[in-house]
Image (spheres, rainbow, N blue to C red):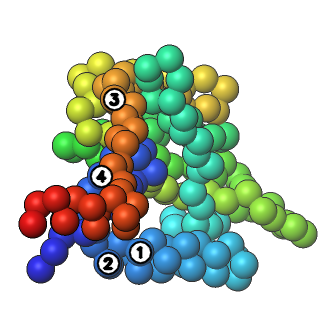
Amino acid sequence: MKSLLRLDPFRTMRTWDPFDDLRTMQSEMDRLFNRFLGAERAGEGEHFSLWLPSIESYNKEGKLFIKAELPGVDAKDLDLSITGRELVIKGERKAEKDEKEKNYSYREISYGSFERRFLLPEGVKTEELKAKFNNGILEITVPVPVVQKAKKIEIETKEPKQIEAEVKKAA
């Protein structure tokens, strides 16, 4: 069976897995329904909702930057790890102890654990990865290898009359 390749968000090629798209779609649908329905899970008598921090990533000056917006998360409640090319950010936003005693009329702030995973580009030097946490923003930087620019290759074409002439010459 032929192996199909696809580009991931960091523009590296990897083998296409048809179930990746289904897993992504299910994850997004779960997130949408949880947000829409206000899905909650109880934990130790406190209010918890499912949430994922907002992320942005970009390349600049030969480095990959990943920023995670983590308001209300303490640095000691964050865990950053790398396995192979996969970067994992885990953490928890904890509710205040006296919060369960309050009578809310409206509530949108979510608490609980989260986990985000990212596939780093091929050839990244993970030993040079750096992370800073300041004012609720986790900023991760890692040098990325220089990717050679695409080279345009000219395609030789011949008119039908040229082909006929060459065939007659060869005969």
Q: Which residue is mark 1?
A: 21
| SS at badge 3 | loop
Of the image marks 3 and 2, the number of the one nearer the N terminus: 2
Of the image marks 1 and 4, the number of the one nearer the N terminus: 4
Confirm whether residue 63 shows in the render. Answer: yes
Q: Cα distance, mark 1 to mark 4?
A: 16 Å
Q: Considering the image in quadrants, where does the N terminus appear?
A: bottom left
Q: Considering the image in quadrants, where does the C terminus appear?
A: bottom left
What x and y, as percent, mark residue 108?
A: 78, 62
Q: Cα distance, mark 2 to mark 4?
A: 15 Å
Q: Which residue is mark 4?
A: 13
What x and y, as percent, mark residue 29?
A: 57, 79
For marks 3 and 2, give the one nearer the viewer. 3
Q: Are marks 2 and 1 in contact (CB under 8 Å)?
A: yes
Q: Which residue is mark 2?
A: 18
Q: Cα distance, mark 1 to mark 3?
A: 29 Å
Q: Are there few (<14), some (14-19), or many (20+) residues within 10 Å of tag 1? A: few
Along the viewing direction, whichever of 1 and 10 lies nearer the viewer:
1
| SS at badge 1 | helix
